[in-house]
Image (spheres, rainbow, N blue to C red):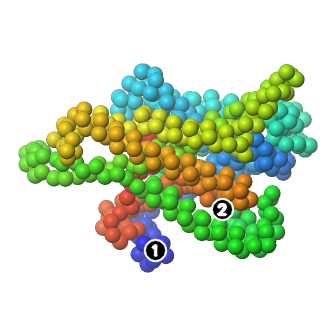
Amino acid sequence: MNPGSPAMFSAFANCWRIPELRARLIATVALIFVARIGANIPLPGIDPKDIMEYYHSMADNAGGGVVAMYNMFTGGALLKGAVFSLGIMPYISASIIMQLASAVVPSIARLQQEGDVGRQKVAQYSRYLTIIIAVIQSALLLGAFCNPQQVGQALGLGNFTGTIVVMENTTLFVLLGVCLLTSGAIVMLWLGEQITQRGIGNGTSMLITIGILADIPGAVTSFVTIAFGGKVGAATAASHGWEKAAGMVILFVLVTAAMVAINQAVRKIPIQYAQRMVGKKMVAAQTNYLPLKVNYAGVMPVIFAGAIMSFPPMLLRPLSGLSPQLSFLAGWADLFSRNNWLYYSVYAVLIFGFSYFWISIMFRPVQIADDLKKNNGYILGVRPGQHTAEFLDFVMTRLTLAGSLFLLIIALMPDLFILQLSFPQRLATFLGGTGGLITVGVMLDTMRQVETYLLQRNYEGFLKKGRIGGVPVPAPGLRSEGDL
């Protein structure tokens, strides 16, 4: 349906006619407003202008991609040296670690299976781990602020001659900064939980999405500059600026449509239920469908692969400067730069590997087969029990192959646009990659929840026919909204 159609406007107007939905929307906006305020309050004792210059010196070097991704997730707070510079990332990292631990640590796995009490315990451990990660990350970040020249030279991130920290007592600055940044991460965690409980959508996903969308004004400025000619950062707009701008618009529409399609795409497995007793009532035989998402792993494989690929250059370059005998490590680090074929080869292998690893953790065909058997359900042409589990595992394996290939293509698009077409970084972010996948998934999930409220009150949803399909997309590092 056309987003500008009267039915769409009617659906938005109906949102304010439902008291509970109206209260949740207002709460969501208010909590997001608090998050954006914290993303614009700089830490005491630093010069935000020098921080911007410092990070811009990294843009075309080894750490540029890492910094750009982290700054995207924090909504620009990192480049401003803000109190919320860590964003929600420490909690996401802690949640990912706990989920991976549940696959290898029996005690944590048992907690996951103990219902709400066990999940609350795991969530509590995740919060404790969030504090530890936030302290470590804040200390490393502030150390880079105190020694920008040494860090930049060691990591090959460009030459920087300014001074970020203007406070004379650097020890006091680090102690105060660690407290403020860790507190900011805890506040972001609390805001995410409040959005989940009192607002609309998954709080963690919503905060990340708003942070990504916060760069829209800058992206629009870059787009207009390209259209009218001139320079945008390191990318020079050629004389055919209008043609390039029109190409960007077409690419944006096509990439967004592809991401929506793959997020909604499911393989429907027909399930036949035999005649059975439900309470004191006999229920006739019926046919339902088991939807299996094509992109079941979501954006997690891309996040994992990107994090691992950032480690080699940041580890090998400092080691290469310790001794002349270790200078060869700098060449190894260059193999993992974004203009080297080895980087993309390993990146592709990691995305495929993590996609199947994530499926092995999250998708439980044996449990699904047992549930179907208990409810007198079966897949047509497949025997109940073990044969059903094997069939579901086979189907999901094939779907994951297609989903992994899609993730790889979307993840490589920003690099392709930047390196081959000289697109500015902030524009390329909206033409695919991790940010685009998260934004599309979260917006679809939020619209799905709002539509549920509308249909329950007999209002028309966003679509005249049918509903917004697909399966809800959890936040990065979270299995479902209930994990918050």
Please determine whether, in this image, residue 220 is positioned above or below residue 159.
Answer: below
Q: Is residue 311 left or right of residue 31?
A: right
Q: Amino acid at mark 1?
A: Asn
Q: Quadrant of residue 362?
A: top left
Q: Amino acid at mark 2?
A: Ile
Q: Quadrant of residue 462?
A: bottom left
Q: State the residue position of label 1.
A: 2
Please identify the residue farthest to the right as the structure is shown: 161
Comparing 21 with 416, the one in front is: 416
Q: Which mark is residue 345?
A: none
Q: Residues within 10 Å of mark 1 (few under 14, many from 20)?
A: few
Please determine whether, in this image, residue 248 is positioned above or below residue 80.
Answer: below
- Tell me where residue 159 appears, x and y as whole percent: 88, 42
- Tell me where residue 164 appears, x and y as whole percent: 85, 42
Badge 2 element: helix
Q: Is residue 330 left or right of residue 466?
A: right
Quadrant holding the N terminus: bottom left
Among the two numbered marks 2 and 1 on one chain, the one whose residue lies closer to the N terminus: 1
Q: Nearer the viewer, mark 2 or mark 1?
A: 1
Q: Is residue 38 visible?
A: no
Q: State the residue position of label 2.
A: 216
| Residue at 63% from the left image edge and 48% from the top image edge | 73
| Residue at 70% from the left image edge and 69% from the top image edge | 244
Comparing 277 with 19, the one in front is: 277
